[in-house]
Each structure stands twice: as C-alpha cells, then as structure tokens.
Image: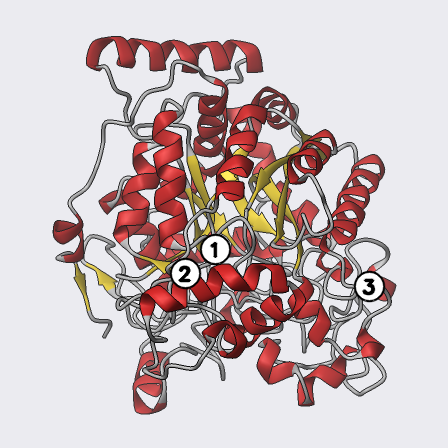
Amino acid sequence: MLPRGRVAARGRDRREEPRIRPATRRNLTILAGLLLAGCRGEVEAMGEGPPPPGTRGLADYHVHQFASESLGGRWLWGEPDGPPAEALAPCSGRGIDHGFLASSEGPFLNLGRHDARGHPDYEGWPRWDSLSHQQVHAGWLKEAHAQGLDLMILSAMDQSDFCALMPDRLRDRPCDDFASVKRQIALARAFERRHADWYDVVESPAEARAAIAEGRLAVVLAVEAGDVFDGADDPLARLAELHALGVRVLQPVHETDNRFAGAAWHSPPLWALETSHFRRHPEEREAQRRLEREDGCHRNGSCPAHTADVAGFVLDEAGLNRRGLTALGEALIGAMMDLGMIVDVAHLSERSIADAHRMARARSWYPLFVSHAHFRDLEPDEVGEWSYGLGVYQQVLETGGVVGVRSSASVTRTYTGSGVANDCAGSSKSFAQRLAFVSRELGLGVGFASDFGGLATNLAPRFGAEACADASGGRRRRQAEAQTGRTGLRIDQRGWGHIGQVGEVMQELRQIGADTAPLAQGAEVFLRMWERVEDPGRRRVLRTFDPDAARATLTDPG
C-alpha cells in the first residue's frame, strides 16, 4: 500500500460547485477583462478577487515527473509508474546503485539524505530531504488529484553539465538535453494513454479548462534544460519542434549561462558547472571575456587573466550576473511569443529578465511567468541571484504573470500580515510567511512549486527528530518544543516528501492559521495568465506595490 495520509478526497467537492462549460466560462472571463480595459485602460492583477464558479483547484507549477530519465538516467531510484513493490522498492544504499553518490558526488550534487528503506513501510523515503528517490509515482499523483490538484506543469528537466559529473555507473546514455527532453515528453504521452481517465496533457487553456471540468488533471508540458538547443544550427526550428511535441512553457536558461542569456547563480558549487559549461562551449567564452575586460575583476576580489576559465560567472558590484539576453536570446523569446508559448523567466539573470520585460512591454504586455521562485527580501539564507529582488516581481505583476512559491525548507522572515507564528524554521510556518507576503503584499497570483524530482528540499516537519530543520542548536530545540497541533499524518515527522501529500500540506496550513485561499486559486490564475497570452487586446496590469513599504512588513524570524 502506498504511504498516504487520511485526508478527505477533494474530488467529491466538485458536485458542490456549479460548473460552467469551458467555452462559456472563458467568454465570461474575456468579457470581464474587456469591460475593465474599457473603463480604466488597464486591467487588474491576475488572481485578484474571487475565482469564477467551478474553477477552484490547486496547481503545482514545477514538477519533474520523469526525472528518472535525466542526468544520465540512473541517479534517481524508483519509477514513476508500476506496482509499488517494484517501482518503489528499497535501494541498496551501496555502490551498486545510486547510493554510491552518498559518499562521493552527493555533497556536491546536494542529493540530501540517503536512507534505503522504501516500500512497503517507507521509513527511509520519501521524505522532505531525500532527493534521490522517487517522489511522483502514479499512485501518489492520483491521490494528489483526488485531494484537489487540478493542474500540474510537467517540467522535462536535464542539465548536461550536471550529467557530465555523474560516474559512469550512473549513466546509461549520453548527456544530451534534447534527447532527454524528448524521452520525457514521450513518457508523458504514454502515461496519459495508460491513465486517460484522470490524466490529460493539454495544449491550450481551453483544453485545460475542459479537462478540469470533466474531472481530470490538466498537465502542461514544460522544458527546463539549458542545453536543449545544443547541436541545433537553427534554434528556432528546434523550438518549433518542441512546440509541435506539445511543449507550452520553456525556460531559456537553467543553471549556467548559455548562448541565449545570463543565468542567475544560486549555489557556490554551481560556479564549477559554469566553468564546465565554458569548457564544453568554447565559442561562448569570448563574450564572457569581453564582460571581464569591462568589469575588471571578479566579485571575490581576485582578478584572474580569464575569469571564464576559472570561475565562470562575471558579476557586478551587487553580485548580479552582468549578462542579459543576447541577440539570439531575444530572437528565441520573440519566437516563443509568436508561437503563444509561456515565457518562464525562472533561472534567468535579473538583467535577462529586465530584457524580457522590455520585450513583453513592446508586445502588449505579454505575460512573464516564474514557475519556481525564491525571494531575496524574504529568505535571508538563500544564496545568490536566483533569490530575486522585488523589482523582478513588479515586472512579472504588471505583465499579468503568476508565480510558483517554492515549498522549500528555508529560513524565512516574518511577514506581519501572515497571521501565522514564524517559530519553526523550514516548515509550513516558514512557507506560510512566503505565501501570504507574495499573494497579499505583492498581489501576485500563486501556486505551489514543489520541484519534486529536481534536487530540491521541501517542507520540513514540525515534530520529531527533524523538526524545524533550518534552525540550529538551542534555537531549533526551543522551536521544536513549542510546536502544537499535530495533524496525525505523515507530514508531522516526515515533512512533505511526495506529491500525494498535497492534501496533508493544505490541512497543516489551515491548522496553523494560514490563509489557503490563494493556493485554491492556483489553477485559475494560471489559466487566466495563459488566456492572456492568447488575447491580442491585453494591456498593462493596473495593480502594483511599493517595494519599500513591502519590506517594512518583514521582520527577522524568531
């Protein structure tokens, strides 16, 4: 039996809400937007006000369902489908399988806890910090859908530079992002055929609304692979090929700079990946050297002859990547807009996002999307540029974009308007601060961004030996002792370890006093953004926020 909490299935709730046919509902949404535009010349922020009838539903904007195909094909233990006794069987924990990483590359690759115990008791995994084991098995995903997950963005992920670091025993295929992405898309289509009664890959907002109205999970194909255009003489032709395969969301970069744009660095070990990238792509090195000549030095104060040969990223005095969109990057994003694709700016440098925003403005405020987001002003321990400043979120807001709030186990400042005690670092109480700040203070539409399968932690537990995991020493002990209100579910002591626990997460958020209404609109605000892509009459979103006033609502965590 799969590990599951005793959470009531949300699927029955559908009968309690009136349904509007997808075409009718979409017409009403467009009509409301036109009325607003006619009265004010601008439109309100996406997600503001109650959702239309029948559209309540959770969304996860960043899930790597077929991550087992990435990074050489053998780093992640467990299969996304099949009988649990086989797909989720215990791994050895020794060198004969991926357990080899626990004592070698593990610390560099941040694979987290390695405990071999899977099916049937799941004592070792899945758990909040076990990153190299399956987290999106079909049984768990179906449970998530029953608990209210109506929309999921399936991100086909790879990173050739990461893949190249894997030992040979953990690679059964070449490191090729494009081939990997195509395999993952093919697996999604095959999965859809096997589970057509509840799983539906959609290619338009109208298809998504129809799938949800008929009780299926709407799945949107996305790509997060910085080298997916490697080997393509014509990247725009390859983009068209990806679109023909059903991809509707794409990130121009991932962990490293590429020929399209600068990336937002976010972890010191990734500097080595940037160096590796330039060694694999010497044709890009000269552009990096030009930046060095203009900049003079690297951020750490050293001035090597060629920073691109030593440390990769070239940063300004604020620690931000000096690279924005290249001419080819502008052509790529322009082609995405021509195809009606969703531009996901996650992992782009802030300069690249500013360039994308300039293009969006020129294209009648084409929406920009952040599938999985960190916040520099909120998360003091998050290192690097990828924890974006508030200026980025202003740009996203005025284009009508939405944001996936990472459910990471990270220390978070207290938002005075959250209504939740911020006294358990890395847990749902930290997430509640981020959720309330982004949805209420910044006015952005939000969804979950679990990043399952993406080498990323999730919400830590509030009870047990791992409680309040992002605090330390006496502070952690005091926080753990102060916790009350157990749910009686797996999340209490294992945290958020697999997608089938989304109902547990919602239950715990309500139990600690968080406002979960913005998450309940996650599917709707994404669909409104997607419909905005298709609307040639879209205008700038009216609502904005004052960054200084927003920062004034934050205090250091207790």
Taking the spot 82% from the left edge, 71% from the top edge, the residue there is 171
In this rendering, the label closer to the viewer, 2 or 3: 3
Q: Secondary structure at mark 1?
A: loop
Q: Nearer the viewer, residue 473 or 445?
A: 445
Is residue 122 something one can see in this rendering? Answer: no
Quick one: quadrant of the C terminus?
bottom left
Cβ atoms at labels 2 and 1 below 8 Å apart? yes
Q: Which mark is residue 386?
A: 2
Mark 1–mark 3 distance (CA, rounded to whole Å) = 24 Å
Residue type, mark 3 in image: Pro
Q: Position of residue 148 (x, y in %)?
A: 55, 40
Q: Which residue is mark 1?
A: 347
Taking the spot 33% from the left edge, 64% from the top edge, the residue there is 294
Residue type, mark 2 in image: Trp
Q: Position of residue 361 (x, y in %)?
A: 34, 29
Q: Nearer the viewer, residue 67 or 508?
A: 67
Please determine whether, in this image, residue 50 is positioned above or below residue 217: above
Residue type, mark 1 in image: His
Mark 2–mark 1 distance (CA, rounded to whole Å) = 6 Å
Q: Which residue is mark 3?
A: 174
Q: Earlier in the sequence, mark 2 or mark 1?
A: 1
Is residue 549 something one can see in this rendering? Answer: yes
